[in-house]
Amino acid sequence: MSFETLRALLQGWAGAGYLPGSLTYGFLVNALLAGLVIGPVLGGLGTLVVTKRLAFFSEAVGHAALTGVAIGILVGEPYTGPYGSLFAYCLLFALLVNFMRNRTGLTSDTLIGVFLSVSLALGASLLLILATRVNIHILENVLFGSVLTVDDRDLTILLVVALGVTALTLPLFNRLLLASFNPALATVRGVPVKAMDYLFILLVAVVTVASVKIIGAILVGALLVIPAAAARVVSTSLRGFFFLSIAFATLSAIAGILLPVELTLPVPSGGAIILASGLLFLGATLSRLALRRTNA
């Protein structure tokens, strides 16, 4: 089924009253489809991010996207979607951080801080060069997301990334999880810990870059972390942790896209998605505290 057919189907259901009326608009259907594609992937991968304590890393990759956009525009890519430079720069950023962590013995947060500072300085310098060539305000879409401008090309890239990440992660999820929880035990059991580490870093980088247009470079890391953190608070098993994280991330994406339009709230979609996930985290925390008091 093509995006055009699916879009027409959802618009028809919205027109018939089976879905929110705002979904009669094609651009909002595109936004919803983007959220439904990337939400479950971010939620599932977020469980590994939380387990490995690499929340700062996912934020750093998102911020590095700004520099990737600046490089892309500088070399002639379209400012609406400089995917070549985005993927290339952010993957290089992620691989260098992991390589240096393995070689220098410095902690992850120290190296991430160094690389992020240099990357942001480079990005700021390039943006000054570009100030006379493009409207700098368009970069607000990169920082805070522009899900309502998602087109079929963006959806195709999202779908390819989501399917690729899912195909790689699901068969290796137990190995990735074991390497995160207990690297020594994983090594004894024959799990290639370093290879799993590099694979995880690449997956986070690719998913983060693919999500930038939806959530924004500043906020994309939050959707990797907050739903998984909320799921960790209330789950009682690894299976529950995984599926609750997917559910929370998907629900946050849907709520953040639809509610501002339905309620006419002056909130950017990226910010609304993260606020929705933040409310879920608050609810999960309060329910956990209430349960403890009941059992006490």
Image: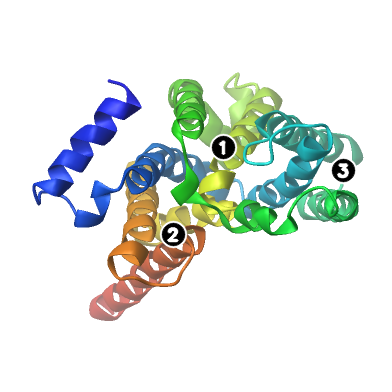
Q: What residue is shown at x 47% (from left), y 42% (from top)?
A: 150
- The answer to whether residue 94 is left or right of residue 17 is right
Q: Nearer the viewer, mark 1 or mark 3?
A: 1
Percent coordinates x, y for residue 167 in the rendering: 45, 20
Q: What residue is shown at x 86% (from left), y 53% (from top)?
A: 132
Answer whether residue 288 is visible to the viewer in this image.
Answer: yes
Answer whether residue 236 is visible to the viewer in this image.
Answer: no
Which of the two residues, 106 or 246, is positioned nearer the viewer here?
Answer: 246
Q: Residues within 10 Å of mark 1 (few under 14, many from 20)?
A: many
Residue type pointed to by label 1: Ala
Q: Which mark is residue 210?
A: 1
Q: Nearer the viewer, mark 3 or mark 2?
A: 2
The quadrant the C terminus occupies is bottom left
Task: Return the residue at label 3.
Answer: 105
Percent coordinates x, y for residue 160 in the rendering: 48, 24
Determine the image quadrant of residue 213. top right
Q: Earlier in the sequence, mark 2 or mark 1?
A: 1
Q: Which mark is residue 273?
A: 2
